[in-house]
Amino acid sequence: MIEGGGSSVKGPEQKLNEIYITVLENSVGHDYDDEEREDSYEMLRKVLGSIVILFAPLSTQSLTRLLDIPKIKVDQTLEDLHAILDIPKLQNRLIRLHHPSFPDFLLDKDRCGNHFWVNGKQAHEALAMSCIQLMSTSPKQDICGLDAPGVPVTDVANSRVEQCLPSELQYICLHWIQHLQKSIHRFLQKHLLHWFEALGWIGKVSKAIYAIASLESITMACNYPQVTKFVHNAKRFVLYNRSVIEQAPFQVYSSALVFAPLMSIVRKQFKDSVPQ
């Protein structure tokens, strides 16, 4: 009964996996040599990985500028993916996913395999860095060229704002912190205890306390409750276990976790780290 139930649940997902893999494989030139195929896989991961983790859709034009990839390469990467993506002919129209299941597929290594798997943490890190890089070169004082500090927003035509603040720049102004938050959250979910242990060995656990407290303030100010809860619990964990980690850093995986409250987010996240 259990096995039968499992297969009925897995059936549709497996079918989706096969469809997505077929489409992706067919988008890579069959006459490519190994090096060319690997280059194509890498470009697919970079372009599709960015599309599936965006907090709002972008056009091909804006995506090209955000990722700093030649337009011809983005076009070549996307040209055979119409079964997965809605890719408008007009370069300034938004690219959209046909089905919301595609991000789950692409971010799951067990489902899509090594060629197409996108590491979500690394993808958010890369996009955060792209956002910061573009933010560092594009925004400037009097960005709309008004030369008049008192001009109200209502007196400036939308077309002028759109021209001076193209879609990719609007996107990064809105979402760069979210990408940074996502990458930090994923890092902490995997490496929080490794970080605490390392600081224990060099006698700097206090640095973790200051860093976590600072990060908590940032996440609270930016209104990201999921990240804030994790960071707050991490702060409580390291404060409570500071002396243990300072005296015997490897205990962060055993006694520190074992004696943490049952509902502790850190305890739940790292339950598999307790030595057997």
Image (cartoon, helix red, strand yellow):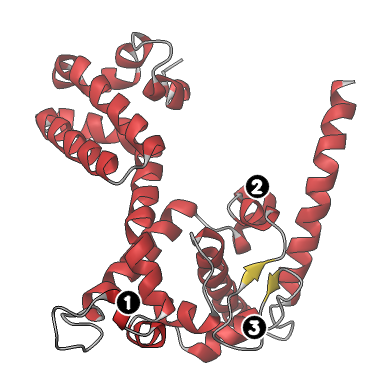
Task: Count neighbours of disc 1 (C-alpha within 10 A) and say few if under 14, some if 14 to 19, many if 20 or more.
Answer: few
Label 3 SS: loop
Residue with the mark numbered 2: 110
Q: Which of 259 and 249 is in front in this view?
A: 259
209 lies left or right of 255: left
Q: Where does the image place residue 190, in percent across and percent down from the top left?
A: 40, 38
Q: Nearer the viewer, mark 1 or mark 2?
A: 1
Residue at 58% of width from left, 58% of height from top?
A: 117
Q: Which amino acid does label 3 sit on?
A: Asp
Q: Where does the image place residue 141, in percent across and percent down from the top left?
A: 15, 80
Residue with the mark numbered 3: 33
Of the numbered discs 2 and 3, the one sitting upstream in the chain is: 3
Q: Nearer the viewer, residue 118 or 219?
A: 219
Q: Quadrant of residue 45?
A: bottom right
Residue at 76% of width from left, 71% of height from top?
A: 83
Q: In this view, does 210 lie above or below 69?
A: above
Residue with the mark numbered 1: 154
Of the numbered discs 3 and 1, the one sitting upstream in the chain is: 3
49 lies left or right of 146: right
CA gap between label 1 and label 2 equals 51 Å
